[in-house]
Image: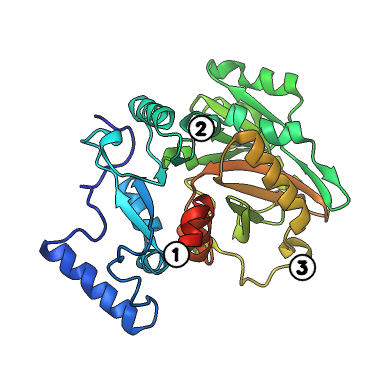
Amino acid sequence: MRLEQDEIVAFKTVGDGGGEGDDVYRKEEKEEEEKGAVSPIAVGFPLMRKLVVVGYALTSKKIKSFLQPKLQGLARNKGILFVAIDQNRPLSDQGPFDIVLHKLTGREWQQILEEYRRTHPEVTVLDPPDAIQHLYNRQSMLQCVADMNLSDSYGKVDIPRQLVIKKDASSIPDAVTKAGLMLPLVAKPLVADGSAKSHELSLAFDQHSLQKLERPLVLQEFVNHGGVMFKVYVVGEAIKVVRRFSLPDVCKREINNPGVLHFPRVSCAAASADDADLDPGVAELPPPPLLEKLAKGLRRRLGLQLFNLDIIREHGTRDKFYVIDINYFPGYGKMPEYEHIFTDFFLSLVPYKKKSC
């Protein structure tokens, strides 16, 4: 089977006996037990304890960032076992699983998962492949936010005005004028599949420069937001918000300068703004009730449990917010306390086993 993303590691059940890997695993267990991180009953998973088995199919990069030792130790302590899914064997022959956690691309993998969901309705698949596909296209990604028309006493949530360009670069200036979009414009790849290329963006200051951009793409009106964005992580009903540095505000003088600025990736762990000395009007987090309503509505409309939102506040306002991107199964390893949030989430999906622990 050929997968269309990062290299897939040689899969191995966490904690399989034999070999050097098993020695490392047992050493980690001993160290965690000595630190008090793992209770004796959790080590080795005695039969009297009903385990929550999470089968995972992730890229090597996602395994490294998500399945960190602290998460695995806490999971063992709570009776959660992570088991790697072998891509070379039929999925139905593996397990049994309570939960299947995945982030692989490719039509063949999608078909395998859909068939597995049909024949194993008792297993929770995070998340349904057809629902995930909705977020891989920036043309449809934000439509759910616009359809919510969310506005209450805590604020208003909208999306920037945008335009999709699929071909014919020479027509871009006329299309922008006809759509009434105001410069500068943020240009993003139309496909948002989690690859490095899909995170690249450009800031165009004049219509002529737009013809130089690679298509297909989405053009969004740039909204000044104090150079800070809010990453809103959603894990089921749990929400966690962090600040990240973003593109700086653009003044009127800069708008008159022709050209395009390219940015490989704007938001990353190194760009955390949580401890920065910021203007209070810029740093203030969006109101929790507003985020809860937004997240709940998107979970229902998208049919997803694991995603994050990139949100900005229009500079000079306190309650006008824009969702500029939605990502499926983002880098949760950067989210504070993600280990506790995820283990609680997994247990909530299999309540009968939680009560038996």
Question: From mark 1 to mark 3, how far is it between C-alphas?
Answer: 45 Å
Question: From mark 3 to mark 2, how far is it between C-alphas?
Answer: 34 Å
Left or right, 302 with reference to 127: right
- Residue 194, position as x, y percentages in the image: 45, 40
Give the foreground label among 3 and 2: 2
Please tell me which of labels 3 and 2 falls first in the chain: 2
- Foreground of the two, 163 or 40: 40
- Disc 1 residue type (three-letter): Cys
- Work out which quarter of the rendered image holds the N terminus and state it: top left
- Foreground of the two, 78 or 29: 78
- Disc 1 element: loop
* Numbered label attached to residue 136: 2
Q: Which residue is mark 1?
A: 357
Q: Which residue is mark 3?
A: 280
Q: Can residue 334 be seen in this snapshot?
A: no
Q: Quarter-wise, where is residue 49 in the image? A: bottom left
Asked if residue 32 is positioned above or below residue 181 in the image, the reply reads below
Give the foreground label among 1 and 2: 1
- Disc 3 residue type (three-letter): Pro
Binning the other alpha carbons within 10 Å of mark 2 as few (below 14), some (14 to 19) or many (20 upward) gives some
- Work out which quarter of the rendered image holds the C terminus and state it: bottom left
Binning the other alpha carbons within 10 Å of mark 1 as few (below 14), some (14 to 19) or many (20 upward) gives few
Q: Report the residue at 34% width, 55% height from top.
A: 82
Asked if residue 208 is positioned above or below residue 296 in the image, the reply reads above
